[in-house]
Amino acid sequence: MINSETKLYCLIGNPVSKSLSPEIHNLSFRLNYINARYLVFNVDNDKLKEAINGIKALKIEGFNVTIPFKESIIDYLDELDDNAKMIGAVNCVKSIDGKLIGYNTDSLAFIHTLEENFENFPELKVAVIGAGGAGRAISFSLAKKNVKELLIINRNIDKAKSLSEDINKYYPDIKILYRNLYDSEKIINQYDLVVNCTSVGMYPELDKCPINPILFTENTFVYDIIYKPEVTNLLYKSEKEGLKTKNGLDMLLLQALYSEVIWMNQEYEILGKKEIFKKGFYKNK
Ligand code: ATR
């Protein structure tokens, strides 16, 4: 029941119309008997400041941030935790005594899913496509896992270069290369894992693909952090090539649950039970 004690949590981004976050959080609140609701707000690209002022004025206690605000939000926050500061991107914010503190639960979630799928990180060569907020979180996570080599691919090569320099400041021993999309095609067959962190292929641009998987080796694991559609064009083409694939649903679920752990200040029993949440998410979508 919604009453005067009901707390509001939300997502700000653009576009957000196909987000699964309300379903995840509202189900989680119900399962945990928390008197709270989660809504999404589509914020115009030039209205981030106004949106944050509104959140502060209404004393909303926590919110998530998605495309295209994961980096630009930092200018409007009072503090960052160490992980978000290192990454330079925020997807989770908590209000503490009126101060907005930024966190990065994308990276916590990504590491969790990596550990479920890989073991020998010092032998793993990884190509990350995208150097925006999500690309930053994932590239730093891979550096933290001490992978053998990191290739950062981005349309805008300057962003790939500055991300690789930022990572090397914290992890000087990691070998990092950076390329634009075109130049990466010649060397992409050297990588064991390819992670798409761009929005290319995301609903509604279903027929787009950031790179042709025909260029990968037969053992490449293809991880697309997009979860809508369930099978992106990249994953469809990769599966046709017989490659192992993974979409972004597990990462979405885990970043959401880690966000709740931060907002509520407590570990949930459901953190290890993400399978409950996966059931039915793609029905009627
Ligand atoms: P997020 O927070 O989800 O990472 P973002 O910071 O807006 O979102 O980053 C989007 C990423 O998708 C960037 O790497 C962007 O490349 P640029 O830095 O060159 O802009 C990439 N991207 C978006 N549209 C693209 C397209 N049509 N082709 C190639 N890359 C694209």
Image (spheres, grey):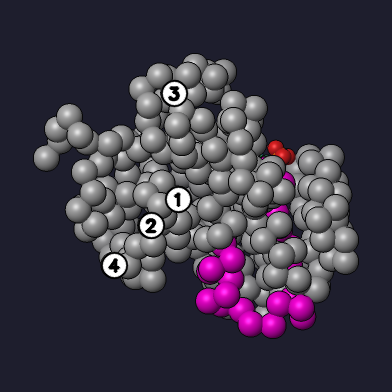
Q: Is residue 189 left or right of residue 114?
A: right
Q: Residue at x 88, y 61 (%)?
A: 172
Highlighted magenta segment, given as a residue range: 110-132
Q: Amino acid at mark 2?
A: Gln
Label 3 Cα crowd, 10 Å radius (few <14 / some 14-19 / many 20+): some
Q: Earlier in the sequence, mark 3 or mark 1?
A: 3
**Magenta residue check for 130:** yes
The residues bearing labels 2 and 1 have C-alpha atoms spaced at a distance of 7 Å
Q: Secondary structure at mark 2?
A: loop
Residue that label 1 marks: 262
Image mark count = 4
Question: Which residue occupies 83% across, 44% down?
Answer: 162
Q: Amino acid at mark 1?
A: Ile
Q: Determine whether 207 is above or below 235 in the image.
A: above
Amino acid type of disc 3?
Lys
- Residue depth check, mark 1 versus mark 4: number of the one nearer the observer: 1
Task: Give the number of the mark in front: 4 or 2.
Answer: 2
CB contact under 8 Å: marks 3 and 1? no
Residue hosting label 3: 56
Q: Which of the two marks, 4 or 3, is nearer to us in this view?
A: 3
- Real-space CA distance between mark 4 and mark 2, rounded to the nearest whole angstrom: 20 Å
Kind of residue sitting beneath label 4: Ile
Q: Please name the residue shown 41% across and 38% down the image.
A: 62
Mark seen at residue 142: none
